[in-house]
Image (tube, grey):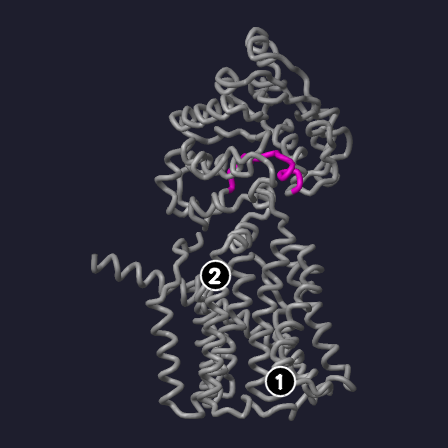
Amino acid sequence: MRPAESSGAVQWRLVVPAVLGALALLATLGQGAALVITDVLIMVLFASSLNLLTSYGGMVSFGHAAYFGLGAYGLALPLAKLGLPLWAGLALGPLAAALGALAIGALCVRLTHIYFAMLTLACSEIVFTILFQAYDYTGGDTGITKFMAPRLGLDPRLYGALVLAIVSACLLLLWKVVRSPIGLAIRAVGEEPHRAAALGYSPRMVQLVAFVIAGTLAGVAGTLFAVYQGNAFPDYAGIGFTIDALVMVVIGGLHSFAGGVYGAVIYTLLKTFVSRYVTEWELVIGLILLAVVLVSPAGVAGGLGRLGHALGRRSA
Amino acid sequence: MLEIRDLHAAYGRSAALHGVSLSVGPGEVVCLVGRNGVGKTSTLRAVVQELIQVTGGAVLLDGASLAGLPPHQVIRRGIGYVPEDRRVFASLTVAENLRVPVAPARGAAARWTLGAVYGLFPQLREYRGRVAGVMSGGEQQMLSIARSLLTNPRLLLLDEPHEGLAPRVVDEIIAALLALKREGVSMLISEQSVRTIKACADRVYVIDKGVTVYHGTPAEFEANPEVARRYLMVAEQGG
């Protein structure tokens, strides 16, 4: 049974404190913390874009980093090789991801379930390999560097605030999409593709639309990440980033809009801080993942929802 | 309106239909009866091209063949399909379920609006904020029918609409079907109970082992108990 998210209104009493809280942290904690917070915010967008596919569209993609990587290279390549201005790169990053998602998605939605997942994996490996091997154009594993000042040369706190604004806007847009008629169609196809077809939808077409929206938002995250780092490496499109996003969504909570947000915050902070003290930080993540799957399959979001219910009942 | 001629269909390599022929006229309610597993569901699925492959014969809607069309295109030509297991979108609310169907083609008269289906099933309006997955079987069936009506079909296919429902709920569904009939909606209903046939059928087809074996009016069907005994009753021991 999936939790209900019937109310279409944006829950401002959750959103406003979260945004203000992030701003306060950015302002008060100093430059080092601002870098971590920015990293978290970018991953929030990346994980949430994957969450559209997994939680609403019923599609598990094993290749979502391809669009993150295309977002990064869509910015870096035109700037480094063609000398285009920054604004053009900022537009071309998400555009490259959108076009990549359109081409790859059109192929992948022809299959379902594990076959869909394998196709997405294969396609992302192709993207990774091209970025890795086309040395003359992409620099291979040395990546593309020194094409711009990291973070546009801004103070980390200022860039963090900029990323916060963009990520918040993208999440609001995603929320609107999920509640829109096309979002309803995405959820309907994700749940019962045959029934959605029996109501006049082409399941493949609806899935492709979801795939392109998710890919484009992953591309925005990738572009922001490339600006943040001031570089682009093939790894950004690699299986590592894909698995990161999948783990974030599972920890955060499948079938919940906030799942990507919770998961990205928890995972990125753990990765950052646990790895400072424990070399085997992946082991810690593994144990947490194990606990989540066994104790609360609906992730942190599902657990919080149940806690809220229990508290509400007690006070009532 | 709908004409099925010597239809053969199969799931992969296992054949399910070996010669189904029937027709549904404008405004007509036709019942397709038969025991479990003889091809009632397969016949309806073959019309909407869902999960089954048509291997021979023809399905014509207003004279035009539906062969090779994907399911959503069949629906857009004016056929509504309410499957056996209802399959409401469990995580969506009632109101959201009713917002999913695609709007009818331009120029087509939209007889069935949200207000009209709420008028037909007042419970749905009452429960519109409720998550569909937690509703009773009868309420889900009403939602499933309402959802299909919103595609404004000229012909509605219903697969055992009363299966597993309490008698009181069956009465409500039958009342709704009669209301639809008065509105002139053509229907093809797969059915095992004689009750629906008596209540609303204009004609009856009996199907057995993937072949239509009998055809008549409800009165003829009732006057011919041998047919019901042979094709509807549970098979005798060893028979």
Residue that carries the numbered disc 1 in the rendered image: A86
| Residue shown at the point (55%, 75%) measured from the top left | A244
> How far from the left and from the top, in percent, is residue B3?
69, 25
**Would you call the spot at circle 2 few (<14 residues within 10 Å), some (14-19), or many (20 or more)?**
some
Labels 2 and 1 touching (C-beta < 8 A)? no
Q: Which of marks 2 and 1 is nearer the N terminus?
A: 1
| Residue shown at the point (50%, 35%) measured from the top left | B112
A288 lies above or below B53: below
| Residue shown at the point (56%, 34%) measured from the top left | B109
| Residues shaded magenta | B73-87
Can I make out residue A81 in this image? yes
Residue type at mark 2 is Lys
Q: Tell me the tag on residue A176.
A: 2
The answer to if B84 sits in the magenta stretch is yes
> How far from the left and from the top, in percent, is residue B180?
49, 26
Question: At numbered mark 2, what does the secondary structure look like: helix, strand or loop?
Answer: helix
In-image side of B7 versus A172 (left or right): right
Q: Looking at the image, is mark 2 or mark 1 nearer the viewer?
A: 1
